[in-house]
Image: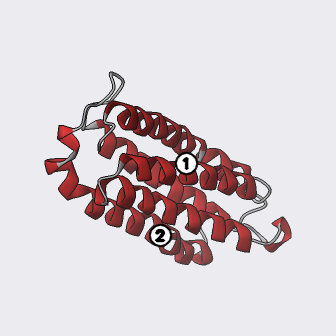
């Protein structure tokens, strides 16, 4: 299926844009994992968690899927034709939400602060919503691809808030 508002997926230009689209989400994923790893072993297991906490295996599976969706959405935005409008705001919004994504890992796990994590995840949620909003005029599919991410972060915010309530001194 051809998207007339995008450069063709099987073009040289699109092939060159694919690694450009992959690098930011992969880097955010790697940095977030690095910031999380130590606390997952020593600190996180000690926290009281709510009944709706998924098993630990669910997190890397979900995040792998979500980072793949982010990369695909970003690749579609990078391929948008100039007639679709300026891409600068969309690119900036995407990169900013990745900073907030890593910021949540730093706040919650790196600083071992559920309260700071709750602030960070709230900023992340808003930044994803803004990214969806600025993606939509350029490419609706790219915008819609971020909805599972927004839903997961809403769930993460609820989980984070419950951890704050259940662990008042943490």
Image coords of residue 155 (percent x, y): 48, 35
Q: What SS does tag 2 mark?
A: helix
Q: Quadrant of residue 73?
A: bottom right
Quarter placement of the C terminus = top left
Name above or below for residue 112 compared with residue 54: below
In front here: 37 or 30?
Answer: 37
Q: Which residue is mark 2?
A: 24
Q: Is residue 117 left or right of residue 122?
A: left
Q: For the view shown, which residue lies furthest in the top direction?
A: 51
* Of pointers 2 and 1, the one earlier in the residue sequence: 2
In front here: 5 or 29?
Answer: 29
Whether residue 1 is visible, yes or no, is no
Q: For the view shown, which residue lies furthest in the left direction?
A: 42
Q: Is residue 50 left or right of residue 1?
A: left
Image coords of residue 10 (percent x, y): 59, 66
Image coords of residue 47 (percent x, y): 24, 37
In front here: 26 or 129?
Answer: 129
Q: How many marks?
A: 2
Name above or below for residue 55 compared with residue 106: above
Q: Which residue is mark 1?
A: 122
Q: Residues within 10 Å of mark 1 (few under 14, many from 20)?
A: some
**Residue at 21% over, 53% down:** 39
Q: CA distance from mark 2 to mark 1?
A: 21 Å
Image coords of residue 101 (percent x, y): 47, 58
Q: Residues within 10 Å of mark 2 (few under 14, many from 20)?
A: some
Q: Is residue 162 left or right of residue 54?
A: right
Q: What SS does tag 1 mark?
A: helix
Picture colour scheme: secondary structure
**Residue at 38% over, 58% down:** 107
**Residue at 56% over, 61% down:** 97
């Amino acid at each position: 299926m051809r998207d007339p508002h995008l450069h063709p997926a099987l073009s040289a230009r699109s092939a060159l844009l694919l690694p450009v689209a992959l690098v930011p989400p992969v880097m955010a994923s790697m940095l977030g994992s690095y910031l999380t790893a130590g606390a997952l072993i020593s600190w996180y297991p000690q926290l009281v968690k709510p009944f709706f906490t998924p098993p630990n295996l669910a997190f890397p599976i979900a995040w792998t899927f979500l980072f793949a969706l982010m990369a695909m959405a970003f690749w579609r935005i990078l391929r948008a034709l100039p007639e679709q409008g300026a891409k600068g705001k969309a690119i900036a919004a995407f990169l900013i939400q990745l900073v907030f994504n890593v910021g949540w890992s730093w706040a919650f796990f790196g600083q071992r602060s559920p309260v700071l994590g709750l602030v960070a995840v709230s900023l992340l949620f808003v930044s994803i919503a803004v990214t969806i909003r600025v993606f939509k005029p350029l490419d609706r599919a790219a915008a819609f691809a971020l909805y599972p991410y927004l839903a997961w972060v809403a769930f993460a915010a609820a989980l984070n808030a419950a951890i704050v309530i259940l662990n008042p001194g943490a």
